[in-house]
Image (tube, rainbow, N blue to C red):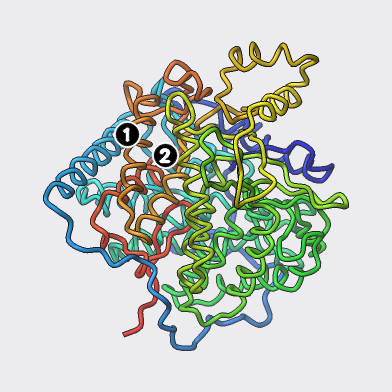
Amino acid sequence: MSTTMKRYGLLLVIAACTVLVFYRFHDTVLPAGRSSFAWGHHSASVGPPLDSQDGRFRWSDVPVRYPVVSLTPLPTAKPKQLPAVQHTFTEESQQAAETRKSRLAAVKGAFERCWKAYKEHAWLQDELAPLSGGYRNGFGGWAANLVDNLDNLWIMGLKEEFEAAVVAAVGIDLSVSSTNIVNVFETTIRHLGGLLSAYDLSQDPRLLHKATEVGEMLLVAFDTPNRMPITRWRPVDGKSGRAQVADGVVLVAEIGSLTLEFTRLSQVTRDPKWYDAVERIVRVFDEQQSKTKLPGMWPVVVNAKDLEFTGDNTFTLGAMSDSLYEYFPKMHALLGGVEPVYEKMYTDSMNTAITHNLWRPMTPDNADILLSGNVRVNPDVEVDPQGQHLVCFAGGMLALGGRLFSNKTQVELGRKLTDGCIWTYRALPYGIMPEIFHMVSCASKDICNWDEDRWRDEVMQRASLQSKGLVDAYIQEQRIPKGFTDLPDRRYILRPEAIESVFILYRITGDQRLQDAGWDMFTAITNATETGLANAAISDVTIGADSKMDSMESFWMAETLKYFYLLFSEPGVISLDEWVFNTEAHPFKRPTVK
């Protein structure tokens, strides 16, 4: 999750400090063979309670300080027949099939290469360091990369590797953490999501048992007076029985993006306690949706301690808010359309975002594309013409929501947002989009003609140059492509969001152009990021391969390569009419109507 915090106000600065503490230590690299580390002292070990028979610690045995009096049950209504999401594909030509299969093989080869390196250099650690051959343990030391890729191993037909990984995964010791603070959101989407997805695909009961164990642990973070979760949680507090209180400063995505995984766990275990836990959060979002400073959307920062979700004045579909909105149409699908609150929250939030957050950038070729920016209400509504790689997911979200709710306008807006990300990839010298950038916002989303003088003026203003005569030299020195006014974060950290939307739009529209765009993205990324072991993030997309960093987050394999693989798979492989993806690209089985 990106952490661009400028001009977000005091509350967001406080939240940023929390985020930066997490990522600062996440970036620590250990050489292969060393024990896991803890933040500040030794790994957090666990005291009682222990199982009386085998002496093992069990999260399910931790006493509950604030018990739930009445559980909200899962909806019992029969799932509805929802509108079809996927395009009706016809049989491909022999030449098209050969091209597709060769691309598919290339993606699978990249995955197998990275998996081999992980096995040899970072087995059971969270992430491989792709330059040094060391590893990172920023997600509890609970083998994040392994759990994150169980479903990939199954989908790609690597069944022997899958079996070995399952054996390793079920042996992960959740009673010991490599970090003092655990990010509940990240653990939910990676570990719980990864285990549930692998279970849905394989029906291996060992995976459901382990997913339940993770779910029991995460539920302890909800043991607060108001049953709101502590999103940056100290497991030691939960284990020791200390009183816990939800935080007053919480990123909205982290508290609002637990619904899909917790609901799926309740569905497959038939135990409503996880659904009940997130349903309490949903009620707060629902009740306060129309009361925020930008009615329909929720601000980046909320107060979980006091149940105040309206105070902040910054609104975005991007970093720190993203998956909150992404999960509304997906929860609608997962519940078979029988819970109306998700359609209501999605419709109202997208109406606001379409009006205020979407903007058209001025481009040299007058491309009919859209981007999504950050809005600040102070007191007028002002949009910052910023683009983020992370917010590229929004094209797929709108297209999926448009299909599920029979809204053709949203499908078209999703296409334009996805085209905006494709355009940005192609506009950079190495064919890769940066983490964050700025462009010139057009006055109209319908008509926008290139104005070179205006572009130069905007570059000058962004750079605080004192003379127009300095602009050309600045553009050249800073390697700013035409159309862009600033590249404040030039990294590419192996992010998946652009190819995620390309994949979804391809499955929805059947447009062959999207497969070709995806292949261009894949070749550009692998050319710039491949190392002797795997693939590495780069610090500057205007420099490319010469700026590699010793980082390969688990989402590279779990999300980015998965979406590339599915883009070139046959359309029936993980059909969007049968599966719904969590924000870490883990597919969950949707209910079907016979």
Task: Give how far apart the Cα atoms at labels 2 and 1 are.
Answer: 9 Å
Ranked by sequence position, the earlier of labels 2 and 1 is 1
Residue for point 42% across, 64% down: 580
Marks 2 and 1 in Cβ contact (< 8 Å): yes
Secondary element type, mark 2: helix
Decide which of 192, 512 is in the foreground and name it. 512
Residue type at mark 1?
A: Cys
Residue 479 shown left or right of residue 212 in the figure: right
User: In front of the other: label 2 or label 1?
Assistant: 2
**Image position, residue 481 (x, y; %):** 55, 25
The image shows residue 463, relative to residue 322, as above or below, that is: above
**Image position, residue 238 (x, y; %):** 65, 56
Decide which of 429, 316 is in the foreground and name it. 429
Check residue 166 in the rendering and tell me which mark sits there, or answer none: none
Residue 182 shown left or right of residue 165 in the figure: right
| Residue with the most extreme left position | 94
Residue for point 52% across, 47% down: 368
- The residue carrying mark 2 is 556
Residue for point 67% across, 76% down: 68
Quadrant, the N terminus: top right
Crowdedness near tag 2: few (<14), some (14–19) or many (≥20) residues, C-alpha within 10 Å:
many
Count of marks, rendered view = 2
Residue 238 shown left or right of residue 117 in the figure: right
Residue 496 appearing in the image: yes
**Image position, residue 579 (x, y; %):** 37, 66
Crowdedness near tag 1: few (<14), some (14–19) or many (≥20) residues, C-alpha within 10 Å:
many
Residue type at mark 2?
A: Trp
Decide which of 141, 504 is in the foreground and name it. 504
Quadrant, the C terminus: bottom left
Quadrant position of residue 5: top right
- The residue carrying mark 1 is 114
Quadrant position of residue 282: bottom right
